[in-house]
C-alpha cells in the first residue's frame, strides 16, 4: 500500500468496501478568520487507476462537517469489470466551490485478486508531513468464486416461486403467420398474447383497486381498436371508480416543461391533460416530479428538468381460486399507455392512418401530420405477472405514492388476508420463479428499514440499482447466447477510446468479456442486439447526434476488444460479428397500402416526402428485454444507458424470471422464436439453435440483404424487418462508416454521431 509501480490486471467480480472512520486529519479550513470548530469537512471517493491515470469512480461517501476524526460507517458493494492497476481511496475536504485533496490510500490490483480481506488502519499518503490515517475493510470476490444461481443476490426483492407470467410482443399481436408458424412446447401453433386487450379486460374485472403509473398516460387513448366507438382509458377508469372500485389511482411523471401555460411540454407526455381530466372525478391522479432533496436550487432544477420517472405498470385485483378472496395481478414493461404505441408485427406506415390509428397518429422522428404520414412504427415488449411477485410491484407503487404525497396515503387500498389470497401459488408445470428489480433512489421512494441493507449509497443517499445487477449477474451466468432488444445501447465509458466518467455502467463491458471468455475457451457463444437505427427525434439535432456518438464509442470498444481476442486466439477465419452482431428494424412498404383517400402531398425534399416516394422508414425499437440461453428473461422499462442503470437518474422497473420445470423448451424460447419470426418475416430453422454459427450467419445474411435493399431509393417491399446496423466492422474490430451510407436514409444525420460542445453529459448518457 505505498507508491509501488503496479501492473494492470482485469478484475471481474464484486468489491465489498467498508469505509469506517479516519483520525488525525489535517485541518484544511484553518485560516485567520476560522472559528475554533470550523475544520475540514472530509469525504472519501474510491477511484480506479490504469497507467497512472484515473479511469473510473466507484463510490463516494457522505461529507462529515467540521470533523478531523470522522466516522462514515458506510458499506459499498461494487460490481467490477475493469482493467486496472490499483484502486485509490481519496480523502478530500469538501468546500463550497470544489474539494481539496487531503491524501490517499492505494491498493494494488494484485493484492485485490488474492481474494483475501484487507482491513485495518492505513496511513494516508499526501503532500503534508502528517495526513492522518483511515480505517478500511476491502474484499474482492472474483466472478469465478461466486455462487451463481438464477436468483440475483443481495437485492431488495427476493426470488418469488410459483408465479404465473405472460409475455407480449407489441400492444397487439394477431394470431397469424409468421407468429403461428412457430411451434410451442406442445407442438401447437404459437398463440400470441394480446396486451392492450388483456389490460382492458383486467381493468374491467377489477373490484377493489386499479393502480397505474407511467412516464406518459393519455386519458383519451383507446386500448381497443374494434372500430365500434371503443371506450377510452379515461372513460373506463372514471366508470370503474364511480361504480364501486374503491381505489383508482394514476401516477404520471410530472414533466417540468409541461404546465398550465403550455400543456404539451417538450416530451408530449400529456401529464397536464390527464391530471386535469381526472381532477373532479373519483380517480385520484397525481403528478410525480423527478426531484432531488437536500440540494442547491440549480441542482434541483437540473434534476427536475433532465431526469424522469420512467416506470410503467398497471396493478389490479382479479378473481382468485377462493371465491371469498381476490388475488393481485400486474402488467409492466416498455409500453406506456399513450399515443403511438399501438402496433403489430406488420408495422404499417400508411395503411392504418384512418382506421386503427385514426385517433392515435404519432411520429416522434420528423414533423408530419396524419394527412401526410408516415406514422412511426413501434416495436416493444411487455409482460404480465401474478403471484407473490405482484405484491413486490405493488410495494414499489405504494412506496412511491407515499413518498410523493403522504397526505394521500389514505387513498391506497388496505390489502389484508381477509380480502386477498396473498399466498396464491401456481402449482402447474408452467409456473415461474420471478424477481423484481428497480432503478430508484430515496428522492423518489421510501425505503423501509429492512430494505436498507440491500441498497447502495452515494454521498449518504440510498439508491437501488438492481436492474443493472440483474443484467450483470445473468451475463456472467450465460452459457450459450444472449439476445437483447433495447432503445439505447451505450455504457462502460471508462473503456472507450476516449474515456468518459458519466456513462460507466458495466453491461457493454460484461458482454464483451463474456464473448472473449468464449473465444479463449473455443465455445459456441453468440450475442444478438437489436436497437433502433437512431434515437427518437431529429437525427440531425445535437442531442441525438451526441447519443449516437456515445453509442458508436461503445460499439467501437466492444468490437476492438473482441477483434484483439480473435487475433490472440489465432482464429484465422473468425470475424467479430460472428460473436456480436447489432441489428435494427426497418419497414419497406408499398404504394398498394396507401389509403384510398384522405392523404395530402408532403412538402418536397422533407423526410415525409422522401418516405412517400421510397416507402421506407425506421421501426422504432423501444423494447427493454434480454433473453439468456432461452431460459431466463428480463423485461422492464430500463434502457441500456446510464440514465436507466445508475439508480440515481431515471426511475425504472423490471422483472426477471424463468420456468424451473421448462428450462429446455419453455415459454421464453417460444417467445424469442415468435419475436424473431416477426422481425425476419418468417420462421427460420436456424433460429432453433441460436448459439450456432449457422444461426448467426443466417441472421447476418438476412440483415445484410435487407440493408442493401433499404439503401436503394426505391427498395422492394418486404415483411422482413431485421437489418444489419449500418456501420462497417473490420476483421480486427475497427469500426467505421459504410461508404454507401454515411447518413441515415430518409431523415439524414450522421450515423457515427457527433459530440456536442454544450449539452450536459448527464442528459445524453
Image (cartoon, helix red, strand yellow):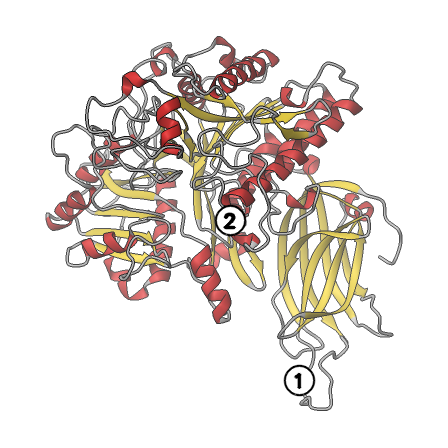
Residue 614: percent from left, percent from top: 39, 22
Crowding at mark 2 (Cα within 10 Å: few <14, some 14-19, many 20+): many
Which image quadrant is residue 480 in? top right
Residue drawn at 62 percent across, 42 percent down: 506
Q: Quick check: can you spot residue 662?
A: no
Which image quadrant is residue 349 in? top left
**Element type at marker 1?**
loop
Q: Which residue is mark 1?
A: 38
- The quarter of the rendered structure image containing the N terminus is bottom right
Residue drawn at 46 percent across, 42 percent down: 638
Vertical comparison of 294 with 395: above or below: below
Mark 1 vs 2, N-terminal side: 1
Vertical comparison of 247 with 389: above or below: below
Residue 256: percent from left, percent from top: 37, 59
Residue drawn at 37 percent across, 61 percent down: 403
Is residue 406 toward the left or the right of residue 324 in the image?
Answer: right
Is residue 579 toward the left or the right of residue 325 in the image?
Answer: right
Choose between 674 and 734: the one closer to the eye: 734
Q: Which residue is mark 2?
A: 643
Residue 576: percent from left, percent from top: 67, 23
Vertical comparison of 447 with 629: above or below: below
Amino acid at each position: 500500500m505505498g507508491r509501488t509501480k503496479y501492473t494492470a490486471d482485469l478484475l471481474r467480480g464484486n468489491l465489498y468496501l467498508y469505509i469506517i472512520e479516519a483520525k488525525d486529519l489535517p485541518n484544511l479550513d484553518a485560516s485567520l478568520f476560522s472559528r475554533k470548530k470550523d475544520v475540514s469537512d472530509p469525504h472519501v471517493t474510491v477511484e480506479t487507476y490504469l497507467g497512472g491515470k484515473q479511469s473510473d469512480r466507484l463510490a463516494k461517501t457522505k461529507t462529515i462537517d467540521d470533523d478531523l476524526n470522522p466516522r462514515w460507517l458506510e458499506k459499498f458493494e461494487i460490481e467490477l469489470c475493469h482493467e486496472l492497476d490499483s484502486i485509490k481511496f481519496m480523502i478530500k475536504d469538501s468546500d463550497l466551490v470544489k474539494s481539496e485533496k487531503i491524501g490517499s490510500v492505494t491498493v494494488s490490483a494484485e493484492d485485490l485478486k488474492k481474494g483475501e480481506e484487507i482491513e485495518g488502519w492505513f496511513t494516508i499518503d499526501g503532500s503534508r508531513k502528517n495526513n492522518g490515517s483511515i480505517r478500511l475493510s476491502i474484499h474482492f470476490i472474483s466472478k469465478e468464486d461466486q455462487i451463481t444461481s438464477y436468483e440475483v443476490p443481495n437485492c431488495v426483492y427476493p426470488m418469488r416461486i410459483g408465479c404465473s407470467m405472460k409475455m407480449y410482443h407489441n400492444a397487439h399481436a394477431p394470431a397469424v403467420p409468421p407468429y403461428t408458424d412457430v411451434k410451442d412446447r406442445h407442438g401447437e401453433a404459437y398463440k400470441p398474447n394480446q396486451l392492450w386487450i388483456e389490460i382492458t379486460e383486467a381493468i374491467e374485472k377489477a373490484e377493489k383497486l386499479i393502480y397505474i403509473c407511467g412516464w406518459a398516460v393519455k386519458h383519451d387513448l383507446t386500448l381497443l381498436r374494434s372500430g365500434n366507438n371503443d371506450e377510452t382509458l379515461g372513460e373506463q377508469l372514471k366508470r370503474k371508480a364511480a361504480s364501486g372500485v374503491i381505489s383508482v389511482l394514476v401516477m404520471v411523471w410530472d414533466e417540468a416543461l409541461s404546465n398550465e401555460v403550455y400543456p404539451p411540454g417538450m416530451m408530449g407526455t400529456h401529464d397536464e391533460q390527464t391530471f386535469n381530466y381526472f381532477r373532479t372525478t373519483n380517480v385520484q391522479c397525481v403528478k410525480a416530479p423527478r426531484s432531488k432533496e437536500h440540494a442547491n436550487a440549480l441542482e434541483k432544477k437540473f434534476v427536475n428538468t433532465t431526469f424522469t420517472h420512467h416506470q410503467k405498470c398497471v396493478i389490479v385485483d382479479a378473481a382468485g381460486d377462493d371465491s371469498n378472496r381476490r388475488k393481485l395481478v400486474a402488467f409492466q414493461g416498455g409500453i406506456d399507455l399513450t399515443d403511438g404505441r399501438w402496433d403489430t408485427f406488420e408495422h404499417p406506415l400508411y395503411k392504418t392512418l384512418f382506421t386503427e390509428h385514426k385517433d392515435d397518429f404519432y411520429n416522434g422522428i420528423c414533423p408530419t401530420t396524419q394527412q401526410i404520414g408516415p406514422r412511426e412504427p413501434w416495436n416493444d415488449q411487455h409482460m404480465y405477472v401474478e403471484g407473490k411477485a405482484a405484491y413486490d410491484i405493488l410495494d414499489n407503487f405504494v412506496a412511491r405514492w407515499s413518498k410523493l404525497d403522504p397526505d394521500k396515503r389514505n387513498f391506497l387500498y388496505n390489502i389484508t388476508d381477509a380480502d386477498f389470497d396473498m399466498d396464491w401459488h401456481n402449482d402447474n408445470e408452467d409456473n415461474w420463479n420471478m424477481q423484481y428489480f428497480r432503478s430508484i433512489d430515496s428522492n423518489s421512494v421510501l425505503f423501509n428499514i429492512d430494505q436498507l441493507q440491500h441498497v447502495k449509497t452515494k454521498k449518504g443517499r440510498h439508491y437501488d440499482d438492481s436492474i443493472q445487477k440483474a443484467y450483470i449477474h445473468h451475463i456472467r451466468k450465460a452459457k450459450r447466447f444472449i439476445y437483447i432488444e433495447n432503445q439505447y445501447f451505450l455504457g462502460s465509458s471508462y473503456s472507450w477510446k476516449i474515456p468518459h466518467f458519466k456513462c460507466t455502467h458495466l453491461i457493454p463491458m460484461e458482454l464483451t468479456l463474456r464473448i472473449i471468455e468464449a473465444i479463449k475457451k473455443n465455445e459456441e457463444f453468440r450475442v444478438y442486439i437489436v436497437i433502433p437505427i437512431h434515437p427518437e427525434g431529429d437525427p440531425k439535432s445535437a442531442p441525438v447526434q451526441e447519443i449516437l456518438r456515445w453509442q458508436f464509442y461503445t460499439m467501437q470498444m466492444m468490437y476492438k476488444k473482441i477483434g484483439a481476442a480473435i487475433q490472440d486466439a489465432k482464429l484465422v477465419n473468425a470475424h467479430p460479428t460472428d460473436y456480436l452482431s447489432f441489428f435494427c428494424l426497418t419497414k419497406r412498404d408499398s404504394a398498394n397500402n396507401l389509403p384510398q383517400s384522405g392523404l395530402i402531398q408532403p412538402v418536397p425534399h422533407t423526410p415525409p416526402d422522401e418516405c412517400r416516394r421510397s416507402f421506407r422508414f425506421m421501426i422504432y425499437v423501444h423494447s427493454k428485454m434480454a433473453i439468456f440461453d432461452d431460459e431466463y428473461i428480463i423485461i422492464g422499462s430500463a434502457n441500456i444507458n446510464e440514465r436507466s442503470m445508475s439508480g440515481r437518474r431515471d426511475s425504472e422497473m423490471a422483472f426477471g424470471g424463468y420456468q424451473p420445470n421448462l428450462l429446455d423448451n419453455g415459454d421464453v424460447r417460444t417467445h424469442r422464436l415468435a419475436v424473431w419470426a416477426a422481425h425476419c418475416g418468417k420462421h427460420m430453422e436456424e433460429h432453433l439453435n441460436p448459439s450456432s454459427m449457422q444461426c448467426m450467419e443466417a441472421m447476418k445474411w438476412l440483415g445484410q440483404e435487407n440493408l442493401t435493399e433499404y439503401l436503394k431509393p426505391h427498395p422492394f417491399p418486404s415483411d422482413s424487418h431485421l437489418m444489419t446496423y449500418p456501420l462497417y466492422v473490420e476483421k480486427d474490430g475497427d469500426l467505421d462508416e459504410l461508404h454507401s451510407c454515411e447518413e441515415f436514409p430518409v431523415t439524414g444525420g450522421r450515423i457515427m454521431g457527433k459530440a456536442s460542445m454544450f449539452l450536459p453529459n448527464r442528459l445524453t448518457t
